[in-house]
Image (cartoon, rainbow, N blue to C red):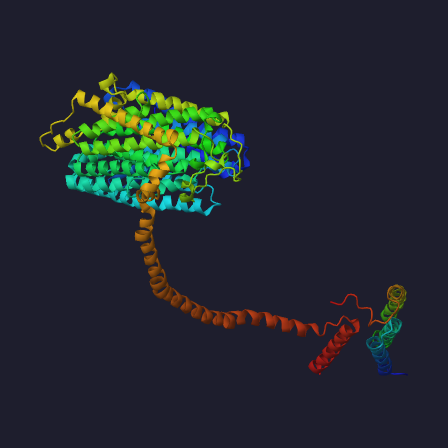
Amino acid sequence: MENYLWLIPFLPACGAVILLIIGRFLPKALVSILACGTIFTSFILAVITFVQLLGLPADERIIHQTVYTWLQAGVFKASVAFLVDPLSIIMLLVVTGVGFLIHVYSIGYMADDKRYSRYFGFLNLFVFAMLLLVSGDNLLMMFIGWEGVGLCSYFLIGFWFEKTANAVAGMKAFIVNRIGDFGFIIGMMLLFWSLGQVSGQWTVTFTELREHAHYLTPAIATAIGILLFVGACGKSAQIPLYIWLPDAMAGPTPVSALIHAATMVTAGVYMIARMNFVYVLSPTAMMVVAIVGVSTALFAGTIGLFQKDIKKVLAYSTISQLGYMFLGVGVGAFGAGIFHLMTHAFFKALLFMGSGSVIHGTGGEQDIEKMGGLRKYMPVTFWTFLIGTLAIAGIPGLSGFFSKDEILWKAFSSSNGHWALWLVGLIAAGCTSFYMFRLLFKTFFGKNRSLHPEHETPEQEVSGSPECCDTPDAHHEKHPHIHESPWIMTAPLVILALLSIVGGYVGIPAIIGGANHIEHFMAPVFETHQEAVATHGEAPLEHQEGSHGTELLLMIVSVLVALGGISTAYYFYMVKPHLPKQIAAKFAFIYNLVFNKYYVDEIYQKVFVSNLLRLNNLLAYQIDLGIIDWIVNAVGLGSVKAAIGSGWTDQTFVDGAVNGTATTVLTGGKVARIPQTGRLKNYLTWAVAGVALMIVGFWLLLR
Amino acid sequence: MIPLQHFLIVSAGLLCLGLYIVLVRKNAVAILMGIELILNGASIAFVAFSRYVSGAVTGQTFVIFIIIIAVCEAAVALAIILNIYQNFRTVDTDQTKELKG
């Protein structure tokens, strides 16, 4: 019954291979059907698997399939094998489900693109890699997927590579990811090696690693945890490696929705949840994860406050929400982190595709200063966007509220949590609701500022986002005909909007009468800190669950903060639209600091990139040119000399012998040709001469 | 009676004369004539030997055959020469060398 498990990643791989090789010869309709069909079939298979999993008893919800042994060296063995448990099935459903909707949306969004089939080929390849990442049963499979998604991300960010900025953004994403991957590889090898050392188990499969993880000492576990988290920082855009994600918005908007919001960037969260058995051994590593997560949430949230590019706002919002997820897993609430991952996939994909719809409808405009009043032009986009915004802001009743509140509550109450983490997370939540509603008001309400240019604000002169370049239709019309997107784009929006509303109902906390299904569903996958410590033979810590009253109070506080953010945004951008400028002018220093993203890119440029380039120059011009090239040239020159000598020998002796033979034959032929005149008389003369000779001979003999 | 040597000297003289003509002349008709001389030289030697050495008529019979064959040869050769003349507009053997290798 498990034989089809391998098909889930295999189908998109097939689609990718077909589309990338012969896709350009196929009609567009067939390309669309092939691309969406493979993903949809995978989704159906994932749903079937999910149903099967639900049919099993809670503790045995694991489906495992080994396809073949990939490599074997002594006792070490790695297989191409798939593991589906409650954690990975949620990821599978999200990746295939949201992935399918984004594929459908792309049919509309990319309709006029000249590299249509290549786009879908890469998109399918990405889904394949992502499915490998989440369904592999060992670290190596996960790593292949991990690298695969990074590669596809690079391809798709630089998809419109005609513009240098897009290609550079792709490279930036790839290189920054490499830095994280370096940490991931080291952490992986350290885990493999140290576990083999202490337990004699040389293994990379998750089940066996989990079984033997308790052999690890806390110090080693801390090192492994932090190194793996470096990898997660790169992939999931956390401080200090978040800088690539805003630039990654250079890619087509559906790509931003799929890769840079819903799936790939959450791979880090998934990885840490998957490796939870290592993290529970090390409170230090978890603390690092939580602190980095919550600082990223706040940091990116504040940058998002003043951005002007619609996609940049969403990018910083994504970074901020990823910070939340890391806060969740960092305080030991792995289930809550994954829950937020799921709901975030719904509403952030929705928001990105909504923004894509806006960009599509306004003919490539991305600056929110030039939008406004779009509500009446594109009603479906507006309403779905509103639902997504309400969900991300954490309004009760929508999915974002339940998952975000779960994380905040765990940050406050769990044994790894702290009230300071909760407080910072709360401020970040306030920022989130403020900048999301700022975006909503500026885009959809008021008058259209590109049709009424007198409303242009002086803020535009400071506008410092030259990278914005999401223009599926390359031409910018001065007054684009603003229109609603076709149904093939709005239908996925509507479905995602529904999911953004109901997606949270699987995790309603007990305090307000829910059952929190999702947390119980995933619980067998995660070890609690107490269990892990208990296996070490130490006394279990007192579980400091806060009282119900506190939980309810905190919930109300966070709702109030969200409403506060919304009303502030309303006051600033609807009631008194000139107030923000005055405040910005008054606190120009702070405004510029935040607007320019705290100059982090510039600092990195000064500190790392330029010094690296200097080192490169040293290596290139001094060492490479001076020493290595000298040796190479010397060897080359020697070879040339030897070759000349060899060539002389060859020409003189070998060729001489060959030519000599030929010349001899030729000369002989010339000589032999002389008597052959073709005159019969000459021949006859020879004959007569012969006869005369014979007569003389006979006469001499017979005398 | 005329001794045998005189016949043989005449015969050898005719043969050498014919051979000389064949080797030296360019005209195909002249060469044909030279060939006739060679044949006649040979015929004289045949008849002389027949008369002086064996006494039988074998040599005379042979000469009859030689004469007949010479006639046939002359007829065929003249036909060939006429054809050569038609094709090459000459009977100079130095210029008819199409088959030279």
Residue A186 percent across, percent down from the top left: 25, 45
The answer to whether residue A34 is above or below residue A655 is: above
Q: Quadrant of the N terminus of chain A?
A: top left
The answer to whether residue A71 of the structure is visible from this angle is: yes
Taking the image as shown, residue A123 lies to the left or right of residue A57, namely: right
Number of on-image labels: 0
Quarter assignment of residue A275: top left
| A315 is higher (above) or lower (below) than A566 | below
Residue A90, position as x, y percentages in the image = 32, 26
Any part of residue A135 in sight: no
- Image vertical order of residue A651 relative to residue A514, above or below: below
Camera-side residue of A488 and A652: A488
Quadrant in which the C terminus of chain A is drawn: bottom right
| Image spot of residue A403 (x, y percent) | 28, 26
Determine whether A684 is above or below A447 in the image.
below
A484 vs A320, left or right, is right
Residue A74 drawn at (x, y percent): 25, 42
Q: Nearer the viewer, residue B13 or B18?
A: B18
Q: Quadrant of residue A392?
A: top left
Residue A172 versus residue A405: which sits nearer the camera? A405
- Is A255 left or right of A224, judged from the image as shown? right
Q: Residue at x 63, y 71 (%)?
A: A666
Residue found at the far top of this picture: A513
